[in-house]
Image (cartoon, rainbow, N blue to C red):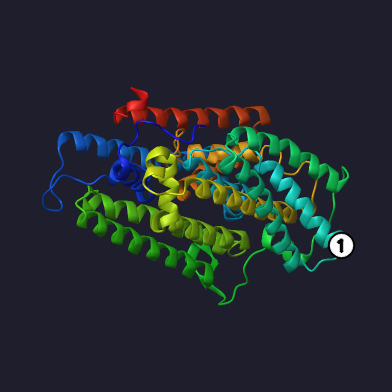
C-alpha cells in the first residue's frame, strides 16, 4: 500500500489543509463552502458531491442495519435475543480492538499483516508471566502491553525510519512472531488464567442499582440503561456541536430534519442494544473497555493535532512533510500503538479461552483489515473513521453469528464474508469515481 497518493492535494499548506480536514469527517465533505452567509445553498456540483460523500459515509450504517434485519428474519429472531447480542460482542471483542489500531494504520497509507501473530505471542507472554512465573496479574498485564509496544516499535522503526514498505516488514513479522509464539509455548497451551483476567474477557458488570421492570420485557439492569441513555445524550450533543461548527465555517450540512432523523435512529439503536444487554447479564466488561477505546480514539482522530497529522500523512505525504508534519514520527507511533492494542487483544483472547495456545490469532489480521475496509477506509489512505471500523467488525461478527445460527458450513461463511469485503471496496472505488477523484478517472 503506497504511503502517498499524488494528486489528492497540491501546494505546501493547501495539501495539509485538505488532508487534515478529513480528520473530522473522513472525506472531502468538510471542504469549505463558497463565500457567503452560512446556510447558502450549494451549487449543483457541490450538492452532487455532498450527496455522494453522504452516501459513502452513511452507506455502511444502512448496510449494517439491513444485514441485521436480514439475519433476524432468517434466524426467526434468534439473532437479537439478549444472550446472542452479548455473545456477538464478547466473541468479536478482540477483532474490534485490532480494528481500531488497523484503521489508523490504513488511514496513514500503510498496512499491518502481523497483528494476528502479535495476538498469539503476547498472549503467550501473558500466560508465561502469570501462570509459569507467578507474576501478579496487574504487573503481568502492564509488562505484556509493554512487550506489544516494543514489538510495534521494532516494526515501526524499519518502516518509518529505514524505509522498508510496511507490507514487507509486517509480513516478515507475521512469520517471526508466530515462530516466537511456538518457541514460548513449546507447541502446547498454557493456562488457566487468574479469575480477574477471565472476568475482563467474559465477565459482566454487577447490578449496582438493581433492576427495573420493563413490562413485557421483564427486568433490566438500571446501570446498563443509564449508561445507554448517557451515550445517546453524548452523541446528540457532540453531533449538534459539530453541526454548529460546520455552519459557522460555511460548510455544507444536512437539513435539520435529516440531522434529527439520524440522531433519533442512532439513539434508538443504542438504547435497543442497551435494553437487551440489561435484560441478560448486564454490560460485558469488555464492552465497557471497547466503549472507552472508541471514545478515546475517536477524540484522538477528530480533535487532536496528532489525529490530523495521521490523515495528512495518508492523504498526501509530500504536502504533509512540506507543511511541517513529522511523518516518520507519526508512522512510528502508529505501529507502537498497534503493538499495544494487539497485546490487549491477545490478553482478551487468551483470557476468553482461559489459556494461551500456539494457534491463537490465526487469520485475525485478515478480519481486522476487512473490518477497516468494510467500515469505510480508503485503499489509498487518508480516509476512515474509528466508528466505521467498529461497524465493519460488527458486520463481520453478525455474518458469522447469523450463519452459525442457521447451521451454514464454514465454506459458505467464508464465501459471504469475501463477497461483502469485495462489495465494500468496490463501493469505495465507485464513490470516488462519482466524486471525480483524479486517481480513478
**Is 189 displayed left or right of 202 in the figure?**
right
What residue lies at 34% left-to-right and 55% top-to-bottom?
263
Total residue callouts: 1
For this orientation, the residue located farthest to the top is 441
Density class for disc 1 (Cα within 10 Å; few <14, some 14-19, many ≥20) is few
Is 166 situated left or right of 146 in this image? left
Where disc 1 sits, the SS reads: loop
Q: Nearer the viewer, residue 100 or 76?
A: 100
Q: Please provide percent x and percent y for residue 30.
A: 29, 46
User: At which x and y percent is residue 146?
Assistant: 68, 58
Q: Is residue 413 visible?
A: yes
The residue lying toward the viewer, choosing from 213 and 138, is 138
Q: In the rendered image of this protein, does residue 129 appear above or below residue 362?
A: below
Task: State the residue in front, 324 or 174.
Answer: 324
Pointer 1 residue: 133
Outermost residue on the left side: it is: 36
Q: Quadrant of residue 344?
A: bottom right
Q: Position of residue 270 (x, y in %)?
A: 45, 57
Residue under the image location 72 percent in, 54 percent down = 352
Say whether residue 358 is visible.
Answer: no
Residue for point 42% across, 45% down: 311
Q: Is residue 159 above or below residue 416?
A: below
The residue closer to the viewer here, 391 or 439, is 439
Residue 113 position in % (x across, y down): 63, 37
Task: Choose top left, top right, bottom left or bottom right for residue 187.
Answer: top right
Quadrant the C terminus occupies: top left
x 40%, y 41%: residue: 62
Locate residue 142 relative to residue 78 in the image: left or right: right
Amino acid at each position: 500500500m503506497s504511503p502517498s497518493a499524488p494528486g489528492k492535494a497540491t501546494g505546501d499548506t493547501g495539501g495539509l489543509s485538505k488532508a487534515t480536514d478529513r480528520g473530522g469527517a473522513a472525506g472531502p465533505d468538510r471542504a469549505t463552502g463558497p463565500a457567503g452567509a452560512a446556510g447558502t445553498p450549494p451549487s449543483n456540483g457541490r450538492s452532487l458531491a455532498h450527496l455522494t460523500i453522504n452516501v459513502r459515509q452513511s452507506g455502511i450504517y444502512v448496510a449494517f442495519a439491513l444485514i441485521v434485519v436480514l439475519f433476524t428474519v432468517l434466524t426467526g429472531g434468534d439473532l437479537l435475543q439478549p444472550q446472542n447480542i452479548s455473545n456477538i460482542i464478547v466473541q468479536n471483542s478482540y477483532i474490534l480492538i485490532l480494528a481500531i489500531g488497523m484503521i489508523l494504520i490504513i488511514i496513514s497509507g500503510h498496512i499491518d499483516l502481523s497483528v494476528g501473530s502479535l495476538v498469539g505471542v503476547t498472549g503467550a507472554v501473558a500466560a508465561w508471566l502469570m501462570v509459569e512465573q507467578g507474576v501478579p496479574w496487574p504487573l503481568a498485564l502492564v509488562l505484556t502491553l509493554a512487550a506489544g509496544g516494543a514489538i510495534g516499535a521494532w516494526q515501526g522503526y524499519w518502516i518509518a525510519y529505514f524505509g522498508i514498505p510496511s507490507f514487507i516488514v509486517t509480513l516478515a513479522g507475521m512469520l517471526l512472531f508466530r515462530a516466537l509464539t511456538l518457541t514460548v509455548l513449546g507447541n502446547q497451551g498454557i493456562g488457566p488464567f487468574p479469575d480477574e483476567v477471565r472476568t475482563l474477557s467474559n465477565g459482566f458488570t454487577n447490578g449496582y442499582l438493581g433492576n427495573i421492570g420493563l413490562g413485557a420485557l421483564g427486568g433490566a439492569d438500571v446501570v446498563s440503561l443509564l449508561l445507554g441513555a448517557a451515550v445517546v445524550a453524548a452523541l446528540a450533543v457532540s453531533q449538534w456541536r459539530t453541526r454548529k461548527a460546520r455552519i459557522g465555517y460555511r460548510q455544507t450540512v444536512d437539513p435539520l430534519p435529516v440531522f434529527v432523523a439520524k440522531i433519533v435512529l442512532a439513539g434508538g439503536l443504542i438504547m435497543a442494544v442497551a435494553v437487551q444487554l440489561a435484560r441478560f447479564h448486564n454490560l460485558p466488561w469488555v464492552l465497557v473497555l471497547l466503549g472507552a477505546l472508541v471514545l478515546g480514539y475517536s477524540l484522538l482522530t477528530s480533535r487532536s493535532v496528532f489525529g490530523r497529522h495521521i490523515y495528512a500523512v495518508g492523504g498526501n505525504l509530500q504536502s504533509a512533510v512540506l507543511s511541517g508534519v513529522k511523518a516518520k514520527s507519526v508512522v512510528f507511533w502508529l505501529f507502537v500503538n498497534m503493538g499495544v492494542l494487539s497485546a490487549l487483544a491477545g490478553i482478551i483472547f487468551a483470557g476468553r479461552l482461559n489459556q494461551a495456545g500456539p494457534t491463537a490469532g490465526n487469520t485475525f489480521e485478515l478480519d481486522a483489515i476487512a473490518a477497516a475496509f468494510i467500515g469505510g477506509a480508503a485503499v489509498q489512505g487518508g480516509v476512515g473513521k474509528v466508528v466505521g471500523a467498529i461497524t465493519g467488525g460488527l458486520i463481520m461478527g453478525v455474518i458469522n453469528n447469523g450463519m452459525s445460527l442457521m447451521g451454514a458450513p464454514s465454506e459458505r461463511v467464508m464465501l459471504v464474508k469475501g463477497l461483502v469485503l469485495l462489495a465494500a471496496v468496490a463501493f469505495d472505488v465507485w464513490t470516488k469515481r462519482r466524486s471525480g477523484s483524479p486517481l480513478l478517472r
